Image (cartoon, grey):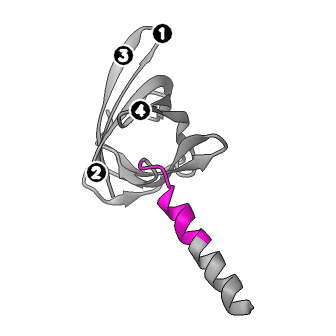
Amino acid sequence: MKTIALTLAATLGFAGAAFADPLEGNWRTPADDNGNSGIVNVAPCGAALCGTLTQAFDGNGAAMQSANIGRQIIFDTTPSGGGEYRGQVWSPDRDKTYNSRLQLNGNTLSVSGCVLGICRDGGTWTRN
C-alpha cells in the first residue's frame, strides 16, 4: 500500500511540474541605467506570476549587495497567448512601475512597458 501511495505522489509531483508556466524560472536582466543587472526568479503568486530579484551584479558582472534583493520586480502578470504576458514591472533604476508587455521567445524575454504615456524598452532578458 505504501508503494502505491508513493508512486501516486511521485506521479502527481511530475504532473504538476509538467503544467509549470513557460515563464517560470530564473531570468538575467540586461544592464540598467546604472550598469547593474540581476537575476529575477519568476514563480506563481496567486492567480498570476511574480518575479523576485534574487541576485544583483555591478557593471563588471561581479555580485553586489542591493537593497532590492527580495523585492518583486514583476507582479500581476498573466499570459495573453502566443508567448505574450501582460502585467506590471518595477524598474529599480527609475523607481517606476510600468504596465508591461513581456514576450517570451524560447530562452529570451523581451520586456517593454509604459507609465503615464511614457514607454520604455526594458531590453531582452535571458533564461539563466
Q: Earlier in the sequence, mark 4 or mark 3?
A: 4
Q: Is mark 2 on a helix, strand or loop?
A: loop
* Left or right of 63, for residue 68: right
Classify 10 Å Cα crowding around label 4: few (below 14), some (14-19), many (20 and above). few
What residue is disc 1 on? 116
Q: Does the magenta stretch include residue 115?
A: no
Q: Which of 13 and 87 is in front in this view?
A: 13
Amino acid residing under circle 3: Cys
Tags 2 and 1 in contact by the CB under 8 Å rule? no
Q: Nearer the viewer, mark 4 or mark 1?
A: 4
Q: Which of marks 2 and 1 is nearer the N terminus?
A: 2
Q: How far apart are marks 2 and 1 (CA)?
A: 30 Å
Above/below status of 35 relative to 65: above
Q: Is the magenta stretch mostly helix, strand or loop?
A: helix
* Left or right of 119, for residue 99: right
Q: Distance between the residues labelled 1 and 3?
A: 8 Å
What residue is disc 2 on? 107
Q: Is residue 13 magenta?
A: yes
Q: Which residue is drawn at 31% across and 33% down?
A: 33
Classify 10 Å Cα crowding around label 3: few (below 14), some (14-19), many (20 and above). few
> Farthest residue in the top direction?
117
